[in-house]
Image (cartoon, rainbow, N blue to C red):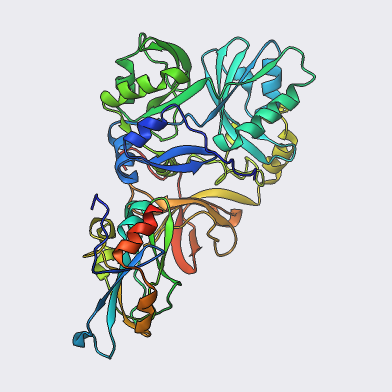
Amino acid sequence: MAQASYPDDLLYHAEHDWARIDAADPTLGGAGPVATLGITWYAQDALGEVVFFEAPAVGTTLTKDASYTEVESVKAVSDVIAPLSGDIVEVNEALSENPATINEDPYGEGWLVKIRLSDPSERDALMDAATYRASLAG
Amino acid sequence: MPPAPLTLRRTALFDRHVEAGAKMVDFAGWEMPVQYQGVREEHMAVREACGIFDVSHMGEIETSGPQALELLQRLLSNDVAQIPIDGAQYSVLCREDGGVLDDLFTYRLDVDRYLTVTNASNHAKDLAWFQAHAEGLPDVRVEDRIDDWAMLAVQGHLAREIVQAISDHPLPERMSAETRNLLGSDVLVCGTGYTGEDGVELLCPTENAVELWDELVKRGATPAGLGARDTLRLEVCFHLYGNDLSEARGPIEAGLGWCCKEDTRFIGSEAVRAVRASGPAEKLVAFALDGPGIARQGNPIVGGGEVTSGTLSPCLGVGIGMAYVPVANAAVGTRLEIDVRGKMRGAVVKDKPLYRKGS
């Protein structure tokens, strides 16, 4: 997408990641809420066309504020920071064939992983869209 | 490394880059366009038609006077006496121990007048080196010309046609450089480049750069940034100083023995002669990954050595790069295991260049 966009229904991390916390999804098994994670419009724009993404394995444990995977443009590798802690329950397999989907639709088809949250209260430390937009302007 | 300057330098074309939506980055103290629309598109524009690069951050040193040849023969690794008037020559600048200070193109403008193009990151160091060695030679002048010249690289199989249309005379051939009148100003047109494509590099007075850029873009040259410049040069295995060349290694290891003529007794020639005679311990090789992934500068190689340049090749669609490896692993066809941030990636040593027209 060509124009900057930060949907209001997402939570944002200062390292330019977003999280969409879903209601518990019975198809994914287990208990507790699941969140979908991805990188923001700002992050994909700064990186340029994503040419390589290798999803981490299902079951990998993410720790809030730590890198859990990488996205790569022609020029550079960029760490992706976990906005929340939890275990990966699903990865976006389609991205290995079409990594540029992360640029084209960063909040939709370009999602990276889904995790089952280990500490749902961590969401309180994330920003809403207005706060994240303001942080980019500063 | 020298401390980073507080303010970045800008070329004459800075406003043009910003207006075109370029992403500007700090490159060797200059605020330069890394890409406009996208590295891949710009890369393919050069391979398939014509791209134009602002490379005004590159420096120029003019060496003139009756002892100009004597000085350059002492500094540059190649045989400067072999450059005809209007000719061009590639060489490296070495320390006494053979470590590479820079790699350079030198153009012979007249009987006793030469222009040497430096890498932006090395310009101040090179200029000081030239000046220090000119002391004691009364009949040579070394002048910094970086502020006088803007430099545009017009590259791709349509490049000559596009530039020819605004030139008063036929363009010089490959590896030669002659002054032509373009849009009313005298421009040094050089039949050189850094992309593996045909094309020219234009050294024009700084004040004429915007008009020249606008006209060439209007005639079909696609603005291309430093990102595409890097992927283009790496596909054809041209060295990048700071990646594939450094003071820590010599020209023989880098595969640049062809531009070292030790009999001219250039500074560093004894060290180069010794390595050439005994054989280097390691060599710079080109490689391509045989699976997914992209190796990057600094990635270690199992069994010794390291990647010095790496990217995803837009034309080949795989991770490519160059690496220093022990000579035992340098033969074409050798399998390498590269530690890419903790993941082992397989690669194969390939012939240079990695990309050839039509491949």
Q: Is residue B30 visible?
A: yes
Q: Residue at x 56, y 56 (%)?
A: B306
Q: Residue at x 52, y 17 (%)?
A: B87
* Horizontal side of residue B305 vs B47, given as left or right: right
Q: Position of residue B82 (x, y in %)?
A: 60, 19
State the image quarter where residue B190 is shown. top left
State the image quarter where residue A39 is shown. bottom left
Q: In the rendered view, would you say B248 is above or below B13?
A: below
Q: Position of residue A121 (x, y in %)?
A: 36, 82
The number of discs equals: 0
Q: Position of residue A21 (x, y in %)?
A: 27, 77
Q: In the rendered view, would you say A85 is above or below B188?
A: below
Question: Who is closer to the viewer here, B160 or B326?
Answer: B160
Question: Who is closer to the viewer here, B54 or B169?
Answer: B54
* Horizontal side of residue B326 vs B158, given as left or right: right
Q: Residue at x 69, y 43 (%)?
A: B275
Q: Is residue A73 visible?
A: no
State the image quarter where residue A99 is shown. bottom left
Question: Who is closer to the viewer here, B143 or B195?
Answer: B143
Q: Position of residue B140 (x, y in %)?
A: 70, 15
